[in-house]
Amino acid sequence: MYSSKIINDPVYGFLTIPSPLIHQLIQHPFFQRLRRIKQLGVTDFVYPGATHSRFHHALGALNLMVKAVETLRQKGVKISDAESDALFAGILLHDVGHGPYSHSLENSIVSKVPHESISYLLMKKLNDEMNGQLDLMLKIFSNQYKKPFLHQLISGQLDMDRLDYLSRDSFFTGVIEGQVGAERIIHMLNVREDELVVEEKGIYSIEKFIIARRLMYWQVYLHKTVVAADILLINIMKRARAICQIEDFSGISKSLKYFLTNEIEISQLRDDEMSIQHFINLDDADIICAIKDWQLSQDKVLSQLSKNFINRNLPKVELSPKPFTSDYILECQKAMKKKFKIESDDMSYFLNNGMLKNDAYLVDQINSIKILKKDNQVLDVAEASDNYNLKAFKTTVKKYYLCFYR
Amino acid sequence: MYSSKIINDPVYGFLTIPSPLIHQLIQHPFFQRLRRIKQLGVTDFVYPGATHSRFHHALGALNLMVKAVETLRQKGVKISDAESDALFAGILLHDVGHGPYSHSLENSIVSKVPHESISYLLMKKLNDEMNGQLDLMLKIFSNQYKKPFLHQLISGQLDMDRLDYLSRDSFFTGVIEGQVGAERIIHMLNVREDELVVEEKGIYSIEKFIIARRLMYWQVYLHKTVVAADILLINIMKRARAICQIEDFSGISKSLKYFLTNEIEISQLRDDEMSIQHFINLDDADIICAIKDWQLSQDKVLSQLSKNFINRNLPKVELSPKPFTSDYILECQKAMKKKFKIESDDMSYFLNNGMLKNDAYLVDQINSIKILKKDNQVLDVAEASDNYNLKAFKTTVKKYYLCFYR
Amino acid sequence: MYSSKIINDPVYGFLTIPSPLIHQLIQHPFFQRLRRIKQLGVTDFVYPGATHSRFHHALGALNLMVKAVETLRQKGVKISDAESDALFAGILLHDVGHGPYSHSLENSIVSKVPHESISYLLMKKLNDEMNGQLDLMLKIFSNQYKKPFLHQLISGQLDMDRLDYLSRDSFFTGVIEGQVGAERIIHMLNVREDELVVEEKGIYSIEKFIIARRLMYWQVYLHKTVVAADILLINIMKRARAICQIEDFSGISKSLKYFLTNEIEISQLRDDEMSIQHFINLDDADIICAIKDWQLSQDKVLSQLSKNFINRNLPKVELSPKPFTSDYILECQKAMKKKFKIESDDMSYFLNNGMLKNDAYLVDQINSIKILKKDNQVLDVAEASDNYNLKAFKTTVKKYYLCFYR
Amino acid sequence: MYSSKIINDPVYGFLTIPSPLIHQLIQHPFFQRLRRIKQLGVTDFVYPGATHSRFHHALGALNLMVKAVETLRQKGVKISDAESDALFAGILLHDVGHGPYSHSLENSIVSKVPHESISYLLMKKLNDEMNGQLDLMLKIFSNQYKKPFLHQLISGQLDMDRLDYLSRDSFFTGVIEGQVGAERIIHMLNVREDELVVEEKGIYSIEKFIIARRLMYWQVYLHKTVVAADILLINIMKRARAICQIEDFSGISKSLKYFLTNEIEISQLRDDEMSIQHFINLDDADIICAIKDWQLSQDKVLSQLSKNFINRNLPKVELSPKPFTSDYILECQKAMKKKFKIESDDMSYFLNNGMLKNDAYLVDQINSIKILKKDNQVLDVAEASDNYNLKAFKTTVKKYYLCFYR
């Protein structure tokens, strides 16, 4: 009998490693690499406690999955040991394809490949190494298994990923109002017709989850200074790539250089061992070292942006319910030209505008969380709730931003 | 009137920035650099939450100093605005001279210069830049000011540095038993004959502080796996330095290369602008990037150690109340030679032994915390306490370690 | 110099007693009596941790007031020592007129006198005893002092009472989502034209406060099982009063008997020393002892209701967005008559209906929290916020309830 | 399949009710009565948050038992459903025989019968009512079952009772250093030769448990002001009993009167239905109501003591490592006679001395916690630990107290 290992965790008290297979996966270099990638990218510029890693989040989500399996089994839902091991492996590896600075640089390093595709690629590589031990996990992960609720536990409206990242990000940022009561929600889960449902007594917890999630979006993930730092980081990479023919990249790591001087497609990552090896070598440290080096670049734009990042001299973000007018934008550009001597051609590295919204995350979600009533009826949460304001949360909130130096 | 800024902090709720001078210091590159240096070096190999930075700790200690000044003023202790600004600046900058991986590499990067000397050097540089605004702070910091209690608040048995790092390290590791009730202790502080004292009613809090501190030493700072990781990291740097004549250091940062290929003295840091600039450029990322690069080094020792670090393949540590016998050590070496094909000359990179003790930290301390009795008498805490076991903590605890691969 | 006393508090770490006057008030029997009155009446039937007392809440609110005064003074707001002592006394005593089971029995024991009037009466008595030391406090408390912000700190949209009770009730019930970040909000307070305002950077904290407050209403204060227990308790007192001519009240305390057999007006409490003395004698224990005794009453209704209370056999509450129809109510009554043999005349002790709403608490509040913009403009929070859903909270939420046995 | 109910709990997040049998027991009047008995008696005179009930503690201990059973089963320890239900019932009811003010009045109400005997009596009555459903529980509870580890989980050095009360009392008093990491310790439990053992990796948690426990004794359970309040309460009951022939007890509850005017033996509680019914009627409220009534007693001693209690006018406690001399005691008595006009005959109600010690709780305990080494050897914790100071805790600490008015 495997005696599960435990790891200290300030969020849940401790984390469990439920099986030898999972222990083996955690020790693999693909997974250890996540120690060196911060969960929230540049967010610690605003919330200095938010230095926690993707590694920690993955272990946290795993821990919740262990509890979810326990709960469901106690309620009579059949989950075999092979299935639970697949669930554990799936949630552990769900973010294994994230690159440096996670979401911030998702389109800047490997520009056309979402992290989910890289995760899936790495999972398959691991499966090959492990002689097919992850076959069932891959099936569940790609939602091709006969029990959809297993997939929903890994990736769905109330999956263990979300429950952990909201809890964990709330904890490390100190935005306590974002706490979601993950263990409480898990306790309310059940399964009907192979779909994940929440028992009726859990409806208030779900409402609080929705409110907390919204709050975390505006307070943390889309906080305007976080957005500003994201934009600055993206512009640095964009500039580096733009001048890669003339910039001497000798001061940066070979792996980062590889991605900045090439446009890598998913097929190349799949077929070219060197390509994926370069990806695996990358973490937040490559980015920091490169930006430190670029402070002395001959290229004035790259040099300026890099100094700004290292010394936390961030652009300002203005928010508005309406798009900013061209007139206003032109005015800002003029002022910047005068004050900072920015050439017109370089303006796109110093002034950016766009839209923030949280609807993609929220509107549909509210519809698709299923509540199991005491009479065994299954309803959408918005219907089942007697909180007549829950519907207010279904409105898409859009905010337009203008990011520039003043 | 300056409206103080506040920053979210999961430990105390929020952190305050009490004056424009302090705001200016925080924005300085010397201080921003601390964002990129973890407070606890390699400790996150054991406690994955312990990724908090020196930057965060310095702000935390500042926040406690703000509270200490408030409390003392309320009790009638005279502290002028100039003195309080000096206190705030002093505690903010007390660790500004820490290099990458803080204590772990303290003797590996700049081998002969303790971090306190570098902190003092950087403070003087800042003072020059700021036209002497930090004169009073420097006087207090070096304990040459007429009110010793101001120095004791920055550096003494109950200084704000210790109160913050115990609270913060306990929080982020999840070792909750290490909590010390920092705000409570601060509330008990007072001053008698210009020395810091603790009011009698605070004696239990002091006892708890001593117990918690001891616990943090053995559970965290001297945890045997942390010691193992420290030794591995130190050996990597030792090896890199040993082969610097033959190793091609093109893949590592110029600043790290500078320190690995030179033995830098304090005089050089003081007099040679380039030298201190290289120091300021360094942070944890240089170390990670170098070690990742060295995985492919021609030097087998450096390559092996580097892979071990990146993939968290740590040596084991055995502890014993007595020194390990030469026979036992020889036996271990033999086994390692056989199993890992290690040459005799390289053995010192793979097997190390030594002693851990916490007395330097604890024994004297217990004597020198002063308790103010209700009758205005001032006593040492060990005398004042009716906890007849407090004296037990005055015994030096020594543990011998042997660190090697098995 | 007064060395402030401190008391352990799980919510804020510790509580301070800032002056000898306050120390004296705390020791007075009027205030000590609040130890024996639970803050949340019957709520511990649902949340077993909610056994905290009015005494604890008053000390908590005092502690926040100490911090508010510190913050405002640091921002240059002039508050004299006499004024701060008045604030401390005022917040300490704001609830001193609460009777047993606080709000639950507010109209059942002294039916026509709100607790605020009794508080004011007791404050005046204390002032007489203390030779006018509370004169200024009484002026501020009744909003007749020249600086309205002092009154607002005791009783206003963001007063220390609310900030403490939300924090404390959230803590002891375990409904963590109700946490409001009291210290953070206090840090944002300021004064403009003698009115309390919140600095602009605090706007998100205010939004969270409003959301948390709403949540606490529906989750705790108006939780349907709490409502059911409240109704049961009120019905017991109503029945006891109805039969006071025939019931032998020898088993209950003299003071409770006094109030059940008399209709006491404010004038009597003011003018008749015995009357107020009886009030001061009352606390939760009188109610519990009476109900235990009434389990054996000859009166079947009183006996049944009392047994139900002691053994937590609570009625059920149904909620609906629309009033319940007379037909439905009649049907329920019929079923009850059959099942429980309840006489028609007694039905009003076993079935009750009515409406719950939280608007009185919320709608106006949102309008009257004032935000101080960076340009020194003062705006209502709803206008100042860019959270386009804040307005959703201004809608009155009404729920109709039907409370009966099934 | 039974869907377990959950209850909010600020300590663990929520509490579970694992089976219909347990649900039924919780609803029984014997158990509901524990809602009205504070876990820590008079401790809230010192720690105002410590108003939590025996009811809450019992549910907390139950919740830990549910987790312990889960953990052990996962490790392959066989526990049948009948056995786990017996464990749940046993821990739920372990304190059901506590009377008002728990330990404080244990020898004052039913002077010769320890609460454990009454608990056992009530369990047997419940078993009769429930037609033997608690047979197995009674066997385990009285350690007559073939698997001793089941008994140890209810009552042993690391039982769920202790783990909960230390966690819960630490939480509600705000003495955070008393936290013991209950869930962590549970995770380390295992069984060898039918005895409960702790896996080696849990040894530090056990050390922390021992340190925390000691701290709770001196900081809370034996806090000198708590001791003073206990003595005052005991003296009130002693006096009431002494004058029961002449005091008119018409103002106190019939059940309390019954116990004050009779010396009840266990046989009477067992055989006389009225006797046990009176016991079941008692809770903290009877004591408070009686003491309030006695403030107006003709007996000056009873009246004075009662006023002191209601208005928290507590005696002072002096502590000393040596017994107090008769001379010193005489001197104190003289001063009291003069100042408070106390008659010689009544002195024993106003001055008391004795000894406090915590050895009974600690010394043996350290010996009897068994550690399971990785090589399957089982050792005492003191032997297994490399914390060379753990032995210091085995010394009995004795403090002599003198409790009197000054």
Image: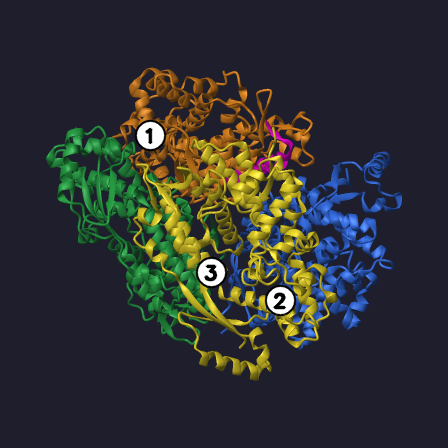
Chain colours: A green, B orange, C yellow, D blue
- Image quarter (top left, top right, bottom left or bottom right) of the C terminus of chain D: top right
Give me the disc on residue C237. 2
Give me the disc on residue B27. 1
Check contact, mark 3 vs mark 2: CB within 8 A.
no
Which chain is mark 1 on?
B
Which chain is mark 3 on?
C
Q: Amino acid at mark 2?
A: Met
Q: Which residues are magenta?
A: B197-221
Secondary structure mostly seen in magenta is helix
Residue B212 painted magenta: yes
Which of discs 1 and 3 lies nearer the camera? The answer is: 3
Instruction: Tell me if I can see residue A293 in this picture.
Output: yes
Which of discs 2 and 1 lies nearer the camera? The answer is: 2
Residues indicated by labels 1 and 3 sit on the same polypeptide chain? no
Cα separation, mark 3 vs mark 2, equals 26 Å
Furthest residue toward bottom: C338
Residues indicated by labels 3 and 2 sit on the same polypeptide chain? yes
Give me the disc on residue C219. 3
Which chain is mark 2 on?
C
Nearer to us in this view, C224 or B340:
C224
